[in-house]
Amino acid sequence: GENVEQHPSTLSVQEGDSAVIKCTYSDSASNYFPWYKQELGKRPQLIIDIRSNVGEKKDQRIAVTLNKTAKHFSLHITETQPEDSAVYFCAAHNDYKLSFGAGTTVTVRA
Amino acid sequence: NAGVMQNPRHLVRRRGQEARLRCSPMKGHSHVYWYRQLPEEGLKFMVYLQKENIIDESGMPKERFSAEFPKEGPSILRIQQVVRGDSAAYFCASSPGRDNSPLHFGNGTRLTVT
């Protein structure tokens, strides 16, 4: 089955700085890569996704890159704000199953 | 669109009791997934269902756990004879299709076994 590894497990950044989270996946058949944000006690919410035929996608302060050859993808958050503090999960979709990384706890320091 | 609806939000059961978790997918979605999340951990796949069919239950313990998604009504995750280790947040997600479709999560059911 698919194995998704995510790094780092925790990330502390100064407000206004950038945050980068990296993930690798094992199954080359995976073709869809969403990112979810989960605030404490709440549900995971989709914030951005990328499909395997695209190398990069941007939505305001959030961008995701995908390197299919190396089987890794990354989330970039620029100009971080306190409301960006949350747990972020990457995931890889293979056929019908979505496999998640272990999560990154991002703390934005004011 | 009301989104994915899960109930109850919180469920407390004593060891040995049964827990029933319900999930109504988003309107138009016929694919339902159940995930378990232990405190400060990631989301672990449990089961994938389409209407009246279990497609993949490879992530679900063989004993005590079962899931269904009947033709009418919500999907049900049932845990019989609960133990303390079953305490977790159980999230349901739905999608309109099988391939490359975003999963939309419900607010989860937080099960506490005392």
Image: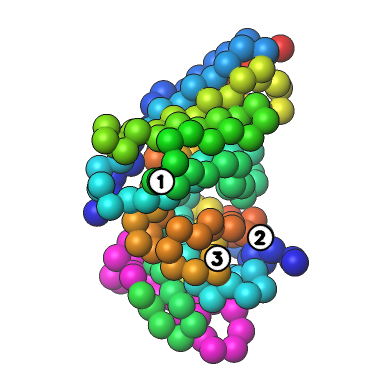
Q: Badge 1 sits on which subunit? A: A
The reply to whether the magenta stretch includes residue B59 is yes
CA–CA distance in space, label 1 to label 2: 38 Å
* x 74%, y 66%: residue: B2
Q: Badge 3 sits on which subunit? A: B
- Residue on which the image places disc 1: A53
Q: Badge 2 sits on which subunit? A: B
* x 52%, y 44%: residue: A49
Q: Which quadrant of the rendered structure holds the N terminus of chain A?
A: bottom left
Q: Amino acid at mark 3?
A: Ser
* x 53%, y 56%: residue: B102
Whether callout 3 and callout 1 share a subunit is answered no
Whether callout 2 and callout 3 share a subunit is answered yes
Question: Can residue B41 be seen here?
Answer: no
The reply to whether the magenta stretch includes residue B7 is no
Q: Amino acid at mark 2?
A: Arg
CA–CA distance in space, label 3 to label 1: 24 Å
As drawn, the label of residue A35 is: none
Check disc 3: other Cα within 10 Å, few if <14, some if 14-19, many if 20+: many
Q: Is residue B72 above or below residue B97?
A: below
Decide if residue A9 is on the left or right side of residue B94: left
- Residue on which the image places disc 3: B94
- Residue on which the image places disc 2: B9
Q: Is residue A59 above or below residue B19?
A: above
Residue A11 placement (x, y as % from top left) = 50, 20
CA–CA distance in space, label 2 to label 3: 17 Å
What's the magenta bit mostly, secondary-structure-wise? loop
User: SS of the residue at dot 1?
Assistant: loop
Place residue A106 in its image quadrant: top right
Residue found at the far bottom of this picture: B71
Q: Which residues are magenta?
A: B56-76
**Which of the two labelled residues, at mark 2 and mark 3, occupies the earlier sequence position?**
2
